[in-house]
Image (cartoon, grey):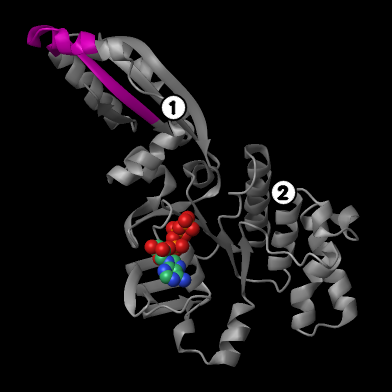
Amino acid sequence: MIKLQNLRKDYYMKKRAVTALKRIDLTIAKGEIFGIIGHSGAGKSTLIRCINLLERPTEGTVEIDGVDLTRLGARDLQKARQSIGMIFQHFNLLASTTIYENVAFPLRLAKKPQAEIDRKVNELLSLVGLTEHAKKYPAQLSGGQKQRVGIARALANDPKVLLCDEATSALDPMTTHSILRLLADINKKIGITIVLITHEMGVIQEICDRVAVIDGGEIVEDGPVAEVFLRPQQPITKEFVEQVSDFELPQELLSQHFNASAAQRELHRIVQVSFLGNVTFQPIMFEVLQQSSVQFNILHGTISRMKDTPYGRLVLELTGDKSDLDRAVTTLQNRGLDVEVMQ
Ligand SMILES: Nc1ncnc2c1ncn2[C@@H]1O[C@H](COP(=O)(O)OP(=O)(O)OP(=O)(O)O)[C@@H](O)[C@H]1O
């Protein structure tokens, strides 16, 4: 659906080049919700703006549905852009026209007949839950409602792709949640491909199928959200994952462990067990540990969701013979649990 190949973007300031993106290769499937996460200045905005050529890449290609946008002339590019909607952090609504007219704007630009505009605007306002606000002006709406207008406007021309440029960064957590739910519902209902950029791992966790981590203008890690959460490879990815995992090993436990003799340490393991999907609700772990004569003590536990997938994490202290401990860990892994020995 979306294929970025060997993308590079240089900005020129007083003839000095600033490289904002380099060596970007990404393929995003039809119907996917794809997140791009990075710190400020990493290149997120530049990357998302290259997808609809609001920024023209210095090198590389941008294919949407098999068409390389970088090769299109002005008129064809304008047409191709109609199949790519975009929403923004600060909504970018027209302040002097009504909500109805804001949503109608792209349809008027596309010279649609009034009857079709009426039908489409009403359908979109209903989809985003703003039917009764049609005659108001943007200043009369809350931030969340303004973003709903932005979403309705972005969907007016039935795009195949929706680009979300930090769409929830100006919103409080409750409103963020409701906008993310709306985006997920729209994705499910009409199968639109969604690409979003954010600096918040919570946003990725809530609605994305896959994620790419961008740092210094390069993609440093990417994959299915669950996999990146369970096994983050790069230090920056670990940092982002820590934004949403709220546990650290208690200090007293760590010092106890380090102060113990080597022989005592042999008889203890601190392990982190992660569960994904239906296995989260199965009693596999307790079964295995009971059968392997290993005693366990739960130090920390959490159950949450990654998009629609249940996800759990437990930190356990295991006590037993070295061979029993090794066998217990291997059996847990063989039964499909992700087990990391922390100490
Ligand atoms: N128009 C421009 N002219 C010159 N340099 C730019 C321009 N736009 C962005 N840059 C530079 O390119 C790099 C990437 O910027 P970009 O805005 O894409 O990052 P970002 O990850 O979106 O950051 P933020 O979250 O703060 O918006 C930064 O070093 C930035 O200073």
- Give the labeled residue for mark 2: 144
Query: What residue appears at the point 47 percent right and 43 percent down from the top-left corner?
Result: 201
Residue 250 shown left or right of residue 144 in the figure: left
- Label 1 is placed on what type of residue? Asp
Q: Is residue 332 above or below residue 264?
A: below
Question: Disc number at residue 55?
Answer: none
Q: Is residue 299 above or below residue 90?
A: above
Along the line of sight, the residue nearer the viewer: 156 or 197: 197
Determine if the magenta segment contains residue 269: yes
Counting residues from the start of the chain, the first of labels 2 and 1 encountered is 2
Along the line of sight, the residue nearer the viewer: 185 or 96: 96
Q: Is any part of residue 310 visible from this angle?
A: yes
- Give the labeled residue for mark 1: 246
Q: Which residues are magenta?
A: 255-274
Q: Residue furthest front?
A: 14
Query: What residue appears at the point 74 percent right and 76 percent down from the top-left corner?
Result: 106
Residue 92: image x %, image y %?
68, 64
